Amino acid sequence: MKIEKLNENQIRCTLTHADLAARHLKLSELAYGTENAKSLFRDMMQQASFDFGFEADDIPLMIEAIPASADSIVLIITKVEDPEELDTRFSKFTPFGESDAVHESPFSKLEGAEEFLDLLNKVKEAAAGAAQAVEEKKAPEPAPAKLFSFENIDRVIQAARLIAQMYQGRNTLYRDPGNDIYILALTQSKHTSNEFNKICNMLSEYGTLERVSGSVLAFLEEHCETVISTDAVQRLTEV
């Protein structure tokens, strides 16, 4: 999530698919005020306050959503002195920071939600088109089929020693500094489905099976440290 100050009354926030995936948030949720969307907006405003002194207490806000590329969307957040002058394309919000029992989340006040969702759909369509173009040009590398998270490196080493004799696939170990956990990404490679399922069941005794998708993998590459690439299980047995 990237936040920039445009002027005293306006900030710009750029969100990527990886940012949304990290919060288990779908694009469509931004228009309908889910708990994840509320949490995202609070974090955006808190970061803007911390970084730029952008305070929105007792001031109405409006948001303009703009598809920026195949994998990102830009939210322009503006303080508005006179809400009656807002264009109907924009959102009208209650003052930020008051209890949800009195005021709804800013996202739940979004007017013209259908128009906003049309913009979001354009982002998804562009992303699908880009992915198809890459698919046609070359065969993609096999994506990790399973992700396991571990609370510390000792648990990862124990798990690696358990499966090392039977698992020979491509695998990578990441560290998520934000949550202070380790994530092991494994591919099925040449193993049969039964073999791979057995290996994953063994790993579940030491780690937690996580959801895997293209967005999650992009998040790992962008925001996490690569501890051991390609042959993490094999190398950890040498420790």
Image: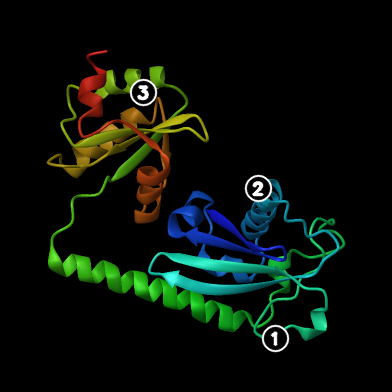
Vertical side of 16 occupied by 162: above or below:
above
For the C terminus, give its image quadrant: top left
Q: Are marks 3 and 1 in contact (CB under 8 Å)?
A: no
Picture coordinates of residue 171, whole percent (x, y):
24, 35
Q: Which residue is mark 2?
A: 51
Q: Secondary structure at mark 2?
A: helix
Q: Amino acid at mark 3?
A: Val
- Judge by depth and name the residue closer to the eye, 137 or 114: 137
Does residue 40 appear in the picture of this structure? yes
Between the C-alphas of marks 3 and 1, the distance is 54 Å
Q: Amino acid at mark 2?
A: Asp
Tell which tag, 3 or 2, sits nearer the viewer. Answer: 2
Q: Secondary structure at mark 3?
A: helix
Q: Residue at x 80, y 55 (%)?
A: 97
Q: Secondary structure at mark 1?
A: loop
- Judge by depth and name the residue closer to the eye, 80 or 202: 80
Q: Which residue is mark 3?
A: 156
